């Protein structure tokens, strides 16, 4: 194997190690999204796994369950979008444009 190939292999290995570390950090990171001025809050990991939902008592109206469903969905979307941004930022720092093009 020539020097250039060894250098490329070393760079690839270093990048892979960096990606693994970034993925571990994202799994540990907690990101909160909200809707309805904060009456519904959703917590996700940096990998977009939902790990918590908090619903304020004022959001619970038995005559309007649809509104609560919409608020929960909106809070999930907010949290996931923030997680996606955090992932792209972390992976972009490794020289991987766009966080591996959405593969993360």
Image: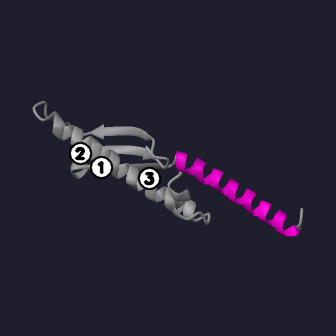
Total marks in image: 3
Mark 2–mark 1 CB contact (< 8 Å): yes
Query: Looking at the picture, does residue 84 appear above or below residue 56?
Result: below
Q: Is residue 30 left or right of residue 40?
A: right
Where is mark 2, residue-wise? 39
Colour mode? one colour
Residue 50: x and y in percent read 41, 40
Q: CA distance from mark 2 to mark 1?
A: 7 Å
Mark 2–mark 3 CB contact (< 8 Å): no
Label 2, residues with CA under 10 Å away: few <14, some 14-19, many ≥20: some
Magenta segment: does it hold 20? yes
Mark nearer the viewer, 1 or 3: 3
Q: Which residue is painted at 75% across and 63% down in the image? A: 11
Task: Give the magenta-colored segment's residue range.
Answer: 3-27
Q: Disc number at residue 34?
A: 1
Q: Is residue 92 left or right of residue 82?
A: right
Q: Tag 2, which secondary structure?
A: loop
Q: Which residue is painted at 58% across and 65% down in the image? A: 93
Q: Is residue 20 left or right of residue 34?
A: right
């Amino acid at each position: 194997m020539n020097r250039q190939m060894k250098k490329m292999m070393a760079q690839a290995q270093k990048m892979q190690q960096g990606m693994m570390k970034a993925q571990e950090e994202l799994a540990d990171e907690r990101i909160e999204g909200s809707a309805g001025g904060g009456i519904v809050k959703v917590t996700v990991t940096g990998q977009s796994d939902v790990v918590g939902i908090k619903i304020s008592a004022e959001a619970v109206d038995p005559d309007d369950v649809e509104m609560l469903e919409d608020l929960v969905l909106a809070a999930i979307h907010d949290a996931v979008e923030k997680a996606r941004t955090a992932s792209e930022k972390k992976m972009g720092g490794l020289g991987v444009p766009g966080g591996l093009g959405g593969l993360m």
